[in-house]
């Protein structure tokens, strides 16, 4: 099993929904998740023809907010959704704060240009 090419990806952040220190902590965690990300990519595409599925990882970023990474494969778009979400603890609703953008494997783009805070490489 290979490792996910996280160094070839970027993180696109939504404006005003996470602090710079939270974003840096998340990127630090992402750099250490190449094996887990590849396992999620392999698992989601393998089972996508039978059943919709999603893998969710909790970041251990040591921030005040709780963040997750959700990965799923969209068989119609032939691409992955890789969303970074902030989890509200009171009602467990989530808000997308960013996404991983890649060309290989191809990822789906969710955040509109007008909502981009900044795009930064993970490496």
Image (cartoon, rainbow, N blue to C red):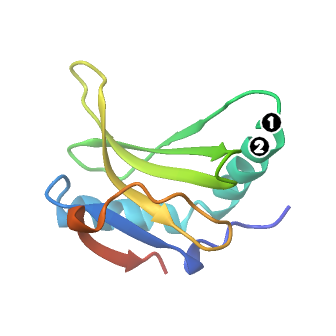
**Mark 2 surroundings: few (<14), some (14-19) or many (≥20) residues within 10 A:** some
Q: CA distance from mark 1 to mark 2?
A: 6 Å
Query: Residue 93 in the image: x percent, y percent?
Result: 29, 26
77 to the left or right of 69: right
Mark 1 sits on what residue? Answer: 47
Q: Give the residue at x 36% y 44%.
A: 85
Q: Secondary structure at mark 2?
A: helix
Is there a contact, CB below 8 Å, between mark 1 and mark 2?
Answer: yes
Q: Position of residue 90 (x, y in %)?
A: 21, 20
For residue 28, which numbered disc appears in the image?
Answer: none
Camera-nearest residue between 4 and 75: 75
SS of the residue at dot 1? Answer: helix
The numbered disc on residue 43 is 2
Q: Quarter holding the N terminus?
A: bottom right
**121 left or right of 55?**
left
Tell me: residue 70, above or below residue 19: above
Seen from the viewer's position, the closer of residues 38 and 72 is: 72
Residue at x 41% of width, y 68% of height = 11
Q: Position of residue 62 (x, y in %)?
A: 31, 50
| Total tally of numbered discs in the picture | 2
Q: Is residue 112 above or below residue 120?
A: above
Nearer to me, 68 or 82 = 82
Percent x, y of residue 95: 29, 39
- Which quarter of the picture shows residue 52? top right
Q: Residues within 10 Å of mark 1 (few under 14, many from 20)?
A: few
């Amino acid at each position: 099993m290979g490792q996910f090419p996280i160094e070839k990806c970027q993180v696109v952040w939504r404006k005003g929904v996470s602090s710079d220190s939270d974003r840096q902590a998340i990127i630090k965690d992402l750099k250490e998740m190449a094996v887990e990300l590849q396992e999620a990519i392999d698992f989601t595409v393998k089972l996508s023809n039978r059943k919709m599925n999603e893998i969710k990882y909790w970041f251990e970023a040591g921030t005040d907010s709780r963040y997750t990474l959700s990965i799923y494969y969209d068989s119609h778009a032939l691409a992955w959704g890789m969303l970074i979400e902030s989890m509200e603890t009171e009602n467990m609703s989530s808000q997308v704060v960013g996404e991983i953008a890649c060309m290989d494997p191809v990822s789906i783009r969710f955040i509109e240009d007008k909502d981009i805070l900044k795009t930064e490489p993970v490496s």
